[in-house]
Image (spheres, coloured by chain):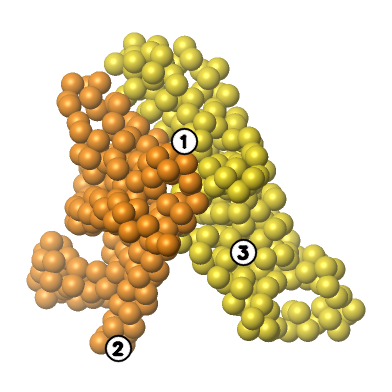
């Protein structure tokens, strides 16, 4: 006795969760790189501001951030739909974590290669673009996938501000049918499948990198 | 803007109630979950495949579900199968189950890196069962896994904000209450964010202190 209507509804919620998280990740990764670069190149003022931003955002719960964006930004005079607020929330959150991942992989980069690049007459920017970045992203890749699983697991925060994601769909069905077990357990199963596939992907990527380049 | 901050801060007793609720929820979770996790780590390290598989299934399924969904399940599903719970009990159960799984996995990771001679040596000196765990293996695991456990504790603090949804008056719940009374959401949530920031950094500082103490004791 599988309730296909319920499954279809939950699938719709899962799609919402996935696409909002997906766009936030797609924006958050390059944004994180930009944030990391201000610290790597020690840009005055900007790097201090970014350090504070990253530190505070990483310590703030996603729910608190979601409420801040959803209620706080309109108070400053902009109108926001829940979907846009959700997207901004997740992007702010994930960009801070990606900034730390990028920074770690760039800081850990072997100094000798950067020195060799400058010996060849490259500017710092050229050395970064041609030597560091093409190699540093490989070290960033596994923690990035790890961060994606974290984002998926904190994405129910957007349900709190009214986005009908997977969690909210489940609680709607539960409220409608007075039978909370099937929707919540199905939703948990869908989350588990998504997270499990991400973890799998991470393993495959790690193995591919090791096979192709010898080291991570 | 400054006067908005001042207005939000007139409600500091509410902020403090929320902060204290967050602190005691997370602190009791940390203590109880760590003890439970120590016992859950034993089946995770078991030689029997069946025992290991069951423990792994539990740990992995809990770890792959978002915290809020688990809170909903405790709050709505348990009463549906006949277990009546207050929101506080549901919140504590969720925190305990969720973090026991995480802590157990962290301890297992540390345990698998522990040289087997430690356990063999302990047994040779006559330590068995709980005493072996308590005096020989446990302390080494906690020291080895210290920083990772600290990170997870910060995650507990951040996850606890989800509990506002099941009406637990923790910090985010209180902040939301304040902004709905005073209509200064921007400033209220910034204050809440800073309180979380201080809390998380204190945990980090505490973990680093404990690590230092452990190092000097080991060096002696």
Who is closer to the viewer here, B109 or B212? B109
User: Are the residues at dot 1 and dot 3 in contact (C-beta closer than 8 Å)?
Assistant: no
Which residue is at the far front? A1
The residue carrying pointer 1 sits among few (fewer than 14), some (14 to 19) or many (20 or more) residues within 10 Å by Cα, namely: some
Left of B84 or right of it: where is A179? Answer: left
Q: Where is residue A92 drawn, in percent x and y?
A: 28, 44
Would you say A183 lies left or right of B204 here?
A: left
Query: Image point 42% across, 58% down: which residue?
Result: A186
* Res. B158 visible in picture: no
Residue B165 is tagged as 1
* Subunit ID for the residue under disc 3: B
Viewer-nearest residue: B171 or B70? B70
Residue at the location (31% across, 36% down)? A162
- Considering the numbered disc 3 on the image, is that residue within a helix, a strand or a loop? helix
Q: Give the letter of the chain under mark 1.
A: B
Quadrant the C terminus of chain A occupies:
bottom left
* Callout 1: SS: helix
**Numbered circle sitting on residue A211:** 2
Q: CA distance from mark 2 to mark 3?
A: 32 Å
Expressed as whole percent of the image width and height from the top left, the position of residue B21 reads 60, 31
Rounded to the nearest angstrom, the CA distance separating label 2 from label 1 is: 46 Å
Labels 2 and 3 positioned on one and the same chain: no
Name which of mark 1 and mark 3 comes first in the sequence: 3
Disc 2 sits on a residue from what chain?
A
Quadrant for the N terminus of chain A, please: bottom left
Q: Which residue is mark 3?
A: B104
Q: Secondary structure at mark 2?
A: helix
- Disc 2 crowd, CA 10 A, few/some/many (<14, 14-19, 20+): few
């Amino acid at each position: 006795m599988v309730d296909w209507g319920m499954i279809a509804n939950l699938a719709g919620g899962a799609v919402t969760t996935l696409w909002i998280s997906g766009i936030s990740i797609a924006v958050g990764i390059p944004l994180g790189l930009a944030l990391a670069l201000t610290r790597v190149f020690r840009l005055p003022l900007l790097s201090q501001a970014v350090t504070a931003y990253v530190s505070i955002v990483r310590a703030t719960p996603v729910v608190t951030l979601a409420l801040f964006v959803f209620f706080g930004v309109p108070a400053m005079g902009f109108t926001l739909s829940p979907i846009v607020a959700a997207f901004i929330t997740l992007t702010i959150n994930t960009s801070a974590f990606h900034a730390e991942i990028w920074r770690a992989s760039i800081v850990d980069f072997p100094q000798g290669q950067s020195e060799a690049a400058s010996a060849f007459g490259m500017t710092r920017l050229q050395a970064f673009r041609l030597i560091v970045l093409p190699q540093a992203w490989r070290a960033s890749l596994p923690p990035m996938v790890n961060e994606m699983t974290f984002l998926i697991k904190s994405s129910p925060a957007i349900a709190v501000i009214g986005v009908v994601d997977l969690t909210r769909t489940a609680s709607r069905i539960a409220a409608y049918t007075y039978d909370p077990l099937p929707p919540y357990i199905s939703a948990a199963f869908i989350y588990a499948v998504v997270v499990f596939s991400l973890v799998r992907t991470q393993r495959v990527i790690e193995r591919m990198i090791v096979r192709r380049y010898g080291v991570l | 803007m400054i006067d908005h901050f001042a207005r939000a801060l007139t409600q500091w007793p509410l902020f403090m109630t929320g902060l204290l609720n967050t602190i005691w929820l997370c602190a009791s979770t940390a203590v109880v979950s760590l003890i439970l996790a120590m016992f859950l780590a034993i089946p995770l390290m078991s030689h029997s495949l069946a025992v290991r598989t069951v423990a792994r299934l539990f740990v992995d399924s809990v770890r792959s579900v978002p915290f809020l969904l688990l809170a909903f399940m405790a709050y709505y599903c348990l009463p549906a199968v006949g277990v009546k719970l207050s929101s506080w009990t549901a919140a504590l159960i969720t925190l305990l189950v969720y973090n026991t799984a995480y802590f157990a996995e962290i301890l297992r990771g540390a345990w698998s890196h522990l040289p087997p001679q430690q356990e063999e040596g302990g047994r040779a000196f006559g330590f068995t069962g709980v005493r072996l765990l308590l005096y020989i293996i446990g302390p080494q695991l906690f020291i080895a896994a210290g920083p990772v456990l600290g990170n997870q504790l910060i995650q507990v603090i951040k996850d606890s904000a989800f509990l506002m949804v099941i009406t637990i008056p923790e910090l985010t719940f209180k902040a939301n209450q304040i902004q709905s009374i005073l209509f200064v959401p921007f400033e209220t949530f910034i204050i809440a964010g800073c309180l979380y920031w201080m809390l998380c950094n204190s945990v980090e500082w505490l973990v680093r202190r404990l690590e230092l103490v452990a190092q000097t004791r080991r060096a002696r």
